[in-house]
Amino acid sequence: MMRYRSHLLTAMGWTSIGANTVLFGAKLVAGLAVGSVAIVADAWHTLSDSLSSVIVLAGTKTARKPADEEHPFGHGRAELIAAVVVGAFLAVVAFNILVSSIGRLQQGGSVIYRREALIVVAMSVVVKEALAQGAFWVARRAHSPAMRADAWHHRSDAITSILVLIGIGLGGSRPWIDGTLGIVVSLFLLYAATKVLREGSVPLLGETPNRTTLAQMQTIAARVSPQLQQVHHVHIHRYGDHTELTCHVRIDGAMSVDHAHHLVDDYERALREEMQVEPTVHVDPVRGGDFKTRR
């Protein structure tokens, strides 16, 4: 399974790098030829996709390293770090496009689009959306936050190109269109960057389990044994595709240590199988009367 996951991520990463490099060259030539800041900005955004794919490849490769003395839970969080780096890079690109677009509005000047520019941008929409779909598919199959971040980068580039096409359709002779489209593009990229940064940073900073997770844990506990009560103090720590889960559970204080141990073993086994986590369950013994009251 790990080899298949690695193959998917590597293949998608290199496909992205190759396609983006070709698109960057075509867009840059077209943008410079017509003097369009929107197309040139779109070209640099495409190149940034190549760089983000390199970061994703590096992150996923590091994440595959086995656990060692300094990293007892493995290196899985390298993927999350890669996702955060890609998000930050996307935010920088968005800011630069915003500054350039405001400058274009202040300076004025017309942009006359050529047929070649239209063809290049239209081709970019198709290729980038295809890359986005492929990256989202790989991210789902491989459970990779870094690849999901890369997919958003592709999707944002496709939408950028669509906005440029709209500008071409409205007529390049209108001075305000090019700069306005650049601002719209930058705002969308900032939104995408915020989404990517949040998805990558939340697991790094620590997650509060949602109600669905808590309900699932309580349901599993009740199915294992009605003597496992009130699952609480739940903590989730994600390390790439490896997740550590710790929790407390109340049991009858009159129960023997041996019996409690077997119940906890059964509960941990059920959590491991049904939630794909590595659980550690702590027992809180409660005296009989209190135990019945809290059930």
Image: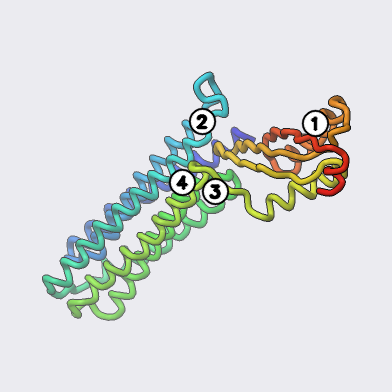
Give the residue pinned by disc 2. Answer: 75
Nearer the viewer's eye, disc 3 or disc 2? 2
The tag earlier along the polypeptide, 3 or 4, is: 3
Between the C-alphas of marks 4 and 1, the distance is: 32 Å
The percent position of residue 78, horizontal first and vertical second, equals 47, 35
The tag earlier along the polypeptide, 1 or 3, is: 3
Q: Nearer the viewer, residue 271 or 4?
A: 271
For residue 4, which quarter of the picture? top right
The percent position of residue 263, horizontal first and vertical second, equals 84, 34
The tag earlier along the polypeptide, 2 or 4, is: 2
Element type at mark 1: helix
Q: Residue at x 33, y 65 (%)?
A: 187
Give the position of the N terminus as an image quadrant.
Answer: top right
Give left or right: position of 258 versus 196. right
Nearer the viewer's eye, disc 1 or disc 2? 1
Nearer the viewer's eye, disc 1 or disc 3? 1
Give the residue pinned by disc 3. Answer: 139
Nearer the viewer's eye, disc 3 or disc 4? 4
Q: Hey, what amino acid is under mark 4?
A: Ser
Between the C-alphas of marks 3 and 2, the distance is: 18 Å
Element type at mark 3: helix
Disc 2 crowd rating (10 Å Cα; few below 14, some 14-19, many 20+) is many
Q: Is the Cβ of the residue at disc 4 closer than 8 Å to that at disc 1? A: no
Give left or right: position of 86 versus 266. left
Q: Nearer the viewer, residue 55 or 293?
A: 293
Q: Nearer the viewer, residue 177 or 116?
A: 177
Q: Hey, what amino acid is under mark 1?
A: Asp
Q: Residue at x 56, y 46 (%)?
A: 207
Disc 3 crowd rating (10 Å Cα; few below 14, some 14-19, many 20+) is many
Give the residue pinned by disc 4. Answer: 201
